[in-house]
Image (tube, rainbow, N blue to C red):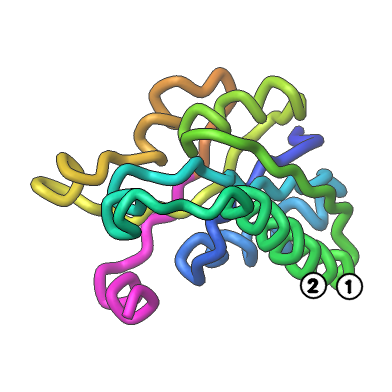
Amino acid sequence: MYKRVLIPLDGSELAEAILPFAEQVAGPLDAEVVLLRVVEAVSAVEAIASAGVIAPDTFAIREMEAKRYLHEVERRLSKKGLRVRTRIALGSPAEAILGAIHTSVVDLVAMTTHGRSGLGRALFGSVAESVLRASPVPVLLIRMPAKHTSAIEE
């Protein structure tokens, strides 16, 4: 059925809420789990907040933190018997996830969604929606109930 599952993570508890799926479904299927962390360039908001002064090593630091984070998640899942590998992609989250679908040759993408609607979706966009619309493979989205989402994001 599924041989390789892509799980994009952003370092948040909300994104990690998909990991029980990996344990319960990918494990018994012996599907390989590909953990993806996208490292974004410095945003306009960050540039403004820092008065336009961005340290040259900011990007390298973000990449190093992403590697550490993925290594820790990989260790936790491997201890539970899952086959795991990690990837770091550079760029915007939706584009990087769609690119990883092709380069990692995955059969399924599994991710959580913030479940924003209305103004929140208009302002922040929806990575999950962008991936869902453009993905050539099935996408499993798990939407956290609002009470859990707000508790995690606090």
Q: State the residue position of label 1.
A: 79
- Mark 2: secondary structure: helix
Q: Is residue 46 visible?
A: yes
- Magenta residues, as a range? 141-154
Figure quadrant of residue 77: bottom right
Percent of width and height locating residue 35:
71, 49
Residue at figure coordinates x 10%, y 46% from the top left: 118
Kindly check if marks 1 and 2 are in contact, taking CB atoms under 8 A apart as contact: yes
- Tell me the CA gap for discs 1 and 2: 5 Å
**The stretch drawn in magenta includes residue 151:** yes
Tell me the crowding category of disc 2: few under 14, some 14 to 19, or many 20 or more residues within 10 angstroms, Cα based: few
Residue 122 image position (x, y, % from top left) = 15, 40
Looking at the rendered image, the quarter that the N terminus falls into is: top right
Numbered label tally: 2
x, y percent for residue 131: 45, 31
Q: Residue 79: within the magenta? A: no
* Rendered position, 42 above or below 3: below
Q: Write the residue at 53% across / 34% down.
A: 91
The tag on residue 55 is none
> Which residue is under mark 2?
76
